[in-house]
Amino acid sequence: MFAACLPTRIITNHCFFASLTMLSLDKLTKQYKTGDLALNDIYLEIPDGQVMALIGPSGAGKSTLIRCVNRLVEPTSGSICLNETELSSLSQGELRRARRRMGMIFQEYALVERLSVMENVLSGRLGYVSFWRSYFRNFPQTDVDEAYRLLARVGLDHMADKRADELSGGQRQRVGICRALIQNPELLLVDEPTASLDPKTSRQIMRLICELCKERKLSAIINIHDVFLAQMFAERIVGLQLGEIVYDGPPDGLTPDVLTTIYGEEDWESTIEKVKEEDFEEKRKDSTSLASGK
Amino acid sequence: MSAIRIWKRPPFIKRAWLRWSLTIGGSLFLLVAIGTMDVNWQRVAAGVPRAERFISSFFPPDFASKSSDIWEGIFESLWMTVVSTVIGILLSIPIGLGAARNLAPRPIYLFFRGVLAVSRTFPEIIIALFAVKLFGFGPFAGIIALSIGSIGFYGKLLAEDIEDMDPVQAEAVKSTGSSWLQWLNYSVQPQVTPRMIGLAMYRFDINFRESAVLGIVGAGGIGATLLTTFDRYEFSSSASILLIIIGIVMAVEYSSGYIRKWVQ
């Protein structure tokens, strides 16, 4: 680990940053062909095991940021360093291997609708198996066991052979979570996980993602436009506005002034009140469920 | 109290002069075109009883007297159809992948779009004329013609279906670290397969009907037999051939509807 920091070793795909940092972005810039500057000189470090919420208005560059990390969008310039691997300069083959280490969860679930739940979950292992094994759906038994274990963890093991388009929104997002986790990732990239879900399911899905991150000691970047959800579940909030970081701090540091810098002028007092109430509700629910021995 | 605000749907063509000149010009053109169509009503009137006689000479259809020729032609048409549909589809898969804008880099895309455009330019019967000149009379020439026709049809529709697919599903599979072939197999193929199976059935149907025409230029199939019966005024045999063609086309139509529902 420390060898990576020695100047002689930096020449290869190694980064400066010590092992406590899972992901670090340095001077990351993305300019689209249309000329829009989606990300402007972003510097961001995510420590090992941290769940970070990225908030900001639509068009602030949240989606671009997480897509630059796994290079679904090619950054224009800057460095992306995942646990000592510099991602921005990888070749196609190396990039595929690096993508296995980053699980991604999508806004509209992004399940392949005509494939079964099991095939969708196992598609998370594609980076690890040969083409013919995946073509004949002949995955190693350990992968199948892990898929069943994950589906059971999210309460969907009885649905394995259903087609993905037969499931409800919340169920689909659980399958999406399983697909990301079966990659055995170090980092989760989560893009608006609750945007198409109802409030109750949104909370359940956010709670599930955060619990799973704790269980597996994963770091996560969660793009979310819902400020209360971000405050309820994340340890750290980063606010993005027009491609620049305008807030980086704890959830309770989101004062009306801060929200105004991120989103613009609006009556934020009532929003903050509501978060406090919801927090209280959550805690009460947790304590009652603990009391009933659930 | 505010004035009444009248609302009208905004016109499709905003500029009034352009709208009116297109409307008037279009109607004038249509009138002139109809005017130049020289319909000789006496000939039409004379044709009607002739058509009656012609149609009545088709009845009763005679399946028996030329049955060996008829069935030989039908089977030749059928296997030409099967072989050319399979060859055409197999070849159009790589071509279609290359001609999809969201899959192929620009130069490859343009090249395969060119291939598709060329194979769609000529109707099957003209390709068959060339093929007969090159390879001689017989079903081989017909198979070549139908395969090329199938590539133009199937490759274009495959490419367009791939371009219309949901990019997010494809992105999700790519983000797992899959290879390109795995990505095709897990995200593109499931999205396009049902429609492509339906189109394969439809192309089979087209190829069978075309194979009945290709015989006229000597490229094999039932067409040659049909033409012979016409030339010899054996209309009751022609009728039986037409009935068999109709029957087969209907059978394909019915089963393709069923299969499409089943694969959806």
Image: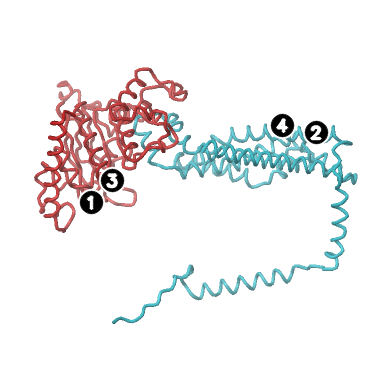
Report the residue marked by disc 1.
A57
Question: Which chain appears red?
Answer: A
Q: Residue at x 87, y 63 (%)?
A: B46
Q: Dot 2 corresponds to which residue? A: B71
- Neighbour tally class for label 1: few under 14, some 14-19, many 20 plus, Cα within 10 Å: some
Numbered circle sitting on residue B79: 4
Q: Amino acid at mark 1?
A: Pro
Image-quadrant location for residue A159: top left
Label 1 residue SS: loop
Residues at marks 1 and 3, CA–CA distance in whole angstroms: 20 Å
The subunit letter for the residue under badge 2 reads: B
Q: Chain of mark 3?
A: A
Chain rendered cyan: B
Label 4 chain ID = B
Residue A54 position in % (x across, y down):
20, 43
State the separation of the CA atoms marked 3 and 2: 64 Å
Task: Check disc 3 and report its element: helix, strand or loop.
Answer: loop
Q: How is the image coloured?
A: by chain
**Closer to the N terminus: mark 4 or mark 2?**
2
Give the image location of residue A262, x and y in percent.
Answer: 17, 51
Toward the viewer: A98 or A294?
A: A294
Residue bearing mark 3: A198
Residue A36's x, y, as percent? 29, 51
**Mark 4 or mark 2, whichever is nearer to me:** 2
Q: Is residue A223 left or right of residue B14?
A: left
Amino acid carrying label 2: it is Trp
Is residue A254 toward the left or the right of residue B88 in the image?
left
Q: Residue at x 61, y 44 (%)?
A: B118
* Amino acid under disc 4: Trp
Residue drawn at 20 percent across, 37 percent down: A25
